[in-house]
Image: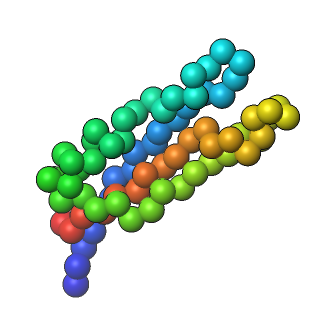
Amino acid sequence: MKRWEYKVITCERSIGLFSRYEWDKDIEEMLPKLGEEGWELVNVIAESSAYGENNAGSTTEEKWIFKREK
């Protein structure tokens, strides 16, 4: 039977009047290394802001879920 291990990378960005709406991690830069280590992306879960008329529904956090065989 196959056994898996999992890795979750959380990316966040601030939303507000003076923010630049940039993510705190460059996931594209991280992907080649993760692939070399055997990690496979299986899901991305986006969470949306619920505050302020201008920001409601803006994605403020993503969880990138990877797996690899043990």
Q: In which quarter of the image is the C terminus?
A: bottom left
Instruction: Give the farthest residue toward the right.
Output: 53
Where residue 63 appears, as percent x and y from the top left, is 48, 49
What residue appears at the point 18 percent right and 59 percent down from the top-left corner? 38
Residue 24 picture quarter = top left
Query: How many labels were placed on the picture?
Result: 0
65 up-or-down from 18: above or below: below
49 up-or-down from 64: above or below: above
Where residue 64 appears, as percent x and y from the top left, is 43, 52
37 up-or-down from 55: above or below: below
Q: Work out whether residue 1 or residue 9 is closer to the camera in this orientation and state it.
A: 9
Left or right for 40, reference 18: left
Residue 40 picture quarter = bottom left
Left or right for 51, reference 20: right
What residue appears at the point 28 percent right and 41 percent down from the top-left corner? 30
Where residue 49 appears, as percent x and y from the top left, is 71, 40
Instruction: Give the farthest residue toward the left.
Output: 36
Q: In which quarter of the image is the N terminus?
A: bottom left
What residue appears at the point 24 percent right and 58 percent down from the top-left corner? 39
Left or right for 46, reference 15: left
